């Protein structure tokens, strides 16, 4: 699933968005303080490198014989046997030992590949993806058109943000087995992330008729949320949580409900759902991040910073890194400006490492660079991403990159496209309001800014304050 964070486009007969307006297409400080900041950045970079390479030793024995929302969707079930122990890393070790003894087991290689994709998702570690590809390719070499391996390639392509490839592999898997749950789910994910919402809704209905269960229910809910039907999304997620039994399913669905509540400014409800997720899995990254965001929105900055520091210490991913940087900036204590810059530097490091492991990171680049980096890099990344897929998230990113580059007239159509499906997102409304005001649509701009703050008054430490300031200035 897209970053719900996932995380598209205007509706139409094919669900694809048009290309709006175009053809489709701080103070330096003392030397001692600088040395302290450099040391902290070095430690953070070390943590990032560790998070991105932690699987290298585990996979080493197999390499020679031939690893975002925004936070991805719940897996469609790697293997009940594999996950039964609750320790994915240990299960992967057992699979590796089995495959050293039985290297012709095509099913084992497919399961290992899927496990690596799941490990990358739960660890926030793109270095698992090359390992996953090798394992899945080995399975297909041994048995061409093996539907679990093809479904694994679909999941891997989606994880790398190659959604066209994900759709292709999902189709091949479903041609072999129309009831393959992972392929059904990957098809929904790919259509959503390509902005083809009408087709995604039909794919969700089909998946529900063939393989009803938590993985399908959560995707069904997200398709409805993206089209503005929050009531149905909440109902489906509530039903999914009631039927969830595995710890992973409970953590995922409860976190999705927490995100839905947070999006609408219901912070106490969100904290309740995140608590339930963490009771099932106390290290579940989306719940830890969501809890910190809800704490920040309620004004508990100390708890929010502590929580987000814990998140990025474990898994330094772009969205929590940016959020932590903005929390530091807002707090404004001595040294916080330097700490904020460290977080933004780590985003750039993550993007470089993700790209080195085959992940399309243009959306992450566009969003982070627009506010905290190189505006030209943000605009190039946003344009490149829009050329690949027309979603509400890419429309918003391109609109904001155009705005910070001083091209508000061009940005206006994209900002409006980002909200045209009915998707309720305060950041999108804030961006739209700023662009509308900058292009002379002052009444519309004020309405959009008010709508953003009415929907989720704590949507961003930086953005919410800027929205209030813009409203005050426009009186």
Image: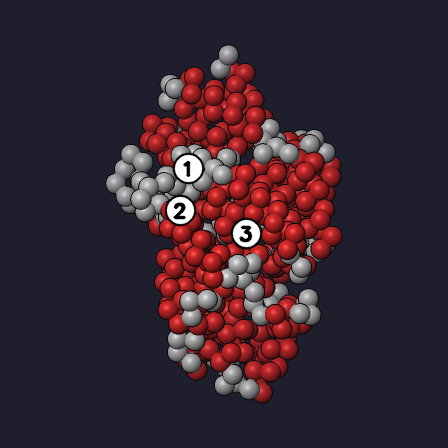
146 left or right of 261 in image: left
Label 3, label 1: how many angstroms apart (C-alpha)? 19 Å
Residue 352: image x %, image y %?
A: 49, 54
- The residue sitting at 70% across, 36% down in the picture is 268
Where is mark 1, residue-wise? 421
Report the residue at 52% width, 71% height from top.
Answer: 113
| Rendered location of residue 80, percent (x, y) | 61, 70
Q: Are the residues flagged by discs 3 and 1 in contact, CB closer than 8 Å?
A: no
Residue placed furthest toward the top: 475
Residue at disc 3, secondary structure = helix
In the displayed structure, 319 sits above or below 213; it is: above
Q: Does 49 sit left or right of 432 as displayed?
A: right
> What element does badge 1 sit on?
loop
N-terminal of the two: label 2 or label 1? 2
Q: Residue at x 73, y 39 (%)?
A: 303
Residue that numbered label 2 is attached to: 197
**Residue for badge 3:** 218
Please tell me how crowded label 1 is: few (under 14), some (14-19), or many (20+) other residues with Cα within 10 Å: many
Give the alpha-carbon distance from disc 2 to disc 1, as whole Å.
9 Å
Frontmost residue, 47 versus 7: 7
* Disc 2: CA contacts within 10 A as few (<14), some (14-19) or many (>=20): many
Label 2: element kind? helix
Instruction: Report x, y in % for residue 430.
Output: 49, 29
* Residue 213, quarter of the rendered image: bottom right
């Amino acid at each position: 699933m897209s970053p719900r964070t996932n995380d598209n486009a205007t509706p139409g007969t094919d669900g694809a968005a048009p290309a709006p307006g175009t053809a489709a297409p701080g103070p330096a400080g003392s030397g001692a303080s600088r040395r302290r900041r450099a040391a902290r950045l070095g430690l953070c970079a070390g943590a990032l490198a560790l998070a991105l390479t932690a699987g290298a030793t585990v996979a080493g024995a197999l390499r020679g014989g031939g690893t975002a929302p925004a936070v991805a969707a719940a897996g469609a079930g790697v293997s009940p046997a594999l996950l039964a122990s609750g320790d994915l890393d240990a299960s992967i070790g057992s699979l590796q030992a089995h495959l050293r003894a039985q290297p012709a087991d095509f099913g084992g290689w497919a399961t290992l590949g899927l496990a690596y994709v799941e490990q990358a998702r739960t660890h926030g570690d793109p270095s698992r993806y090359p390992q996953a590809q090798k394992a899945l390719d080995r399975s297909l070499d041994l048995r061409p058109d093996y539907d679990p391996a093809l479904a694994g390639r679909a999941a891997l392509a989606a994880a790398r943000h190659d959604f066209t490839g994900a759709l292709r592999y999902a189709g091949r898997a479903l041609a072999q087995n129309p009831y393959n749950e992972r392929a059904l789910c990957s098809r929904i994910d790919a259509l959503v992330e390509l902005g083809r919402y009408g087709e995604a809704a039909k794919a969700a209905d089909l998946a529900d008729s063939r393989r009803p269960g938590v993985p399908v229910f959560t995707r069904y809910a997200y398709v409805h949320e993206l089209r503005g039907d929050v009531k149905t999304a909440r109902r489906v997620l509530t039903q999914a949580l009631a039927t969830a039994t595995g710890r992973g399913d409970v953590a995922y669905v409860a976190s999705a409900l927490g995100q839905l509540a947070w999006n609408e400014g219901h912070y106490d409800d969100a904290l309740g759902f995140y608590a339930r997720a963490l009771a099932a899995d106390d290290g579940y990254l989306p719940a830890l991040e969501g809890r910190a965001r809800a704490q920040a929105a309620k004004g508990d900055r100390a708890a929010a910073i502590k929580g987000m520091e814990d998140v990025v210490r474990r898994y330094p991913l772009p969205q929590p890194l940016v959020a932590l940087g903005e929390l530091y900036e807002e707090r404004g204590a001595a040294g916080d400006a330097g700490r904020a810059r460290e977080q933004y530097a780590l985003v750039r490091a993550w993007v470089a490492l993700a790209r080195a492991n085959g992940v399309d990171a243009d959306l992450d680049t566009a969003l982070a660079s627009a506010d905290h980096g190189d505006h030209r890099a943000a605009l190039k990344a946003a344009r490149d991403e829009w050329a690949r897929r027309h979603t509400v998230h890419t429309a918003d990113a391109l609109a904001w990159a155009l705005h910070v580059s001083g091209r508000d007239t061009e940005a206006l159509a994209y900002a409006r496209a980002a909200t045209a499906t009915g998707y309720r997102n305060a950041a999108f409304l804030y961006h739209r309001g700023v662009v509308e005001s900058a292009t002379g649509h002052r009444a519309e701009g004020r309405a959009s800014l008010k709508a953003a703050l009415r929907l989720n008054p704590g949507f961003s430490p930086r953005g919410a304050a800027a929205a209030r300031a813009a409203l005050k200035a426009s009186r």
